[in-house]
Structures are given as C-alpha cells and as structure tokens.
Amino acid sequence: MKTFLLTVMLIGSLAVSASAADTFYVMFNKTTKKCSVSTTPPTETEKFSMMGQYGSEQAAKQAMSKMKECKG
C-alpha cells in the first residue's frame, strides 16, 4: 500500500510540474544572432531580447519561423 501511495504522489508531482510550463518564450540571442524557445522569460536583457510569449511550444516555434530575425 505504501508503494502505491508513493507512486501516486510521484506521478501527481510530475503532472503538476509538466502543466506549469504552459508559457513559452521566443528569445533572440544578440550575441549569436539566433532565436530559441524557452519556458522562462529572459533575465539577461543585455544578451537576449524577448520576441514573444505563447501558450504552447508549437505556437512559439511556428511564430519563430515567421520572424525575420530568426531566419538567419
């Protein structure tokens, strides 16, 4: 019974952490001149520019593919 409860708690904690990443950010690295998708907003504003905030990774990647800064 203890093993079952521990397993349920572990699965529940993983589900909560996975659902917490519901915001994706497209960031432009000013040094490398490349874009990337992240689940955290950029904190180093000298190095990164935030290009947009999206509700899914797919939406962020789709938007990134249309940005002229990200096509290089």
Image: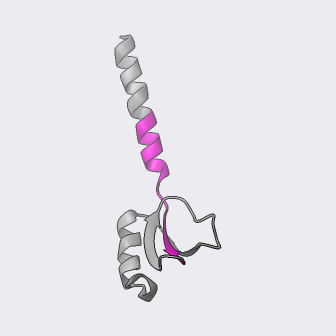
Figure coloring:
one colour
Q: Position of residue 14 (x, y in %)?
A: 42, 38
Q: Nearer the viewer, residue 43 or 12?
A: 43
Residue positioned 43% across, 69% down in the render: 36
Residue positioned 40% across, 77% down in the render: 64
In the image: residue 25, left or right of residue 58: right
Q: Residue furthest bottom?
A: 68
Q: Position of residue 71 (x, y in %)?
A: 37, 84
| Label total for image | 0
Residue positioned 54% across, 59% down in the render: 40
Q: Quadrant of residue 5?
A: top left
Q: Quadrant of the N terminus?
A: top left
Residue positioned 41% across, 20% down in the render: 6
Q: Quadrant of the C terminus?
A: bottom left
Q: Which residues are magenta?
A: 13-30
In the image: residue 27, left or right of residue 65: right
Q: Quadrant of residue 50?
A: bottom right
Q: Residue furthest top?
A: 1
Does 5 appear above or below 44?
Answer: above
> Is residue 32 located in the magenta-colored stretch of the structure?
no
Q: Nearer the viewer, residue 60 or 38?
A: 38
> Is residue 29 located in the magenta-colored stretch of the structure?
yes
Q: Position of residue 56 (x, y in %)?
A: 41, 63
Q: Position of residue 48 (x, y in %)?
A: 57, 72
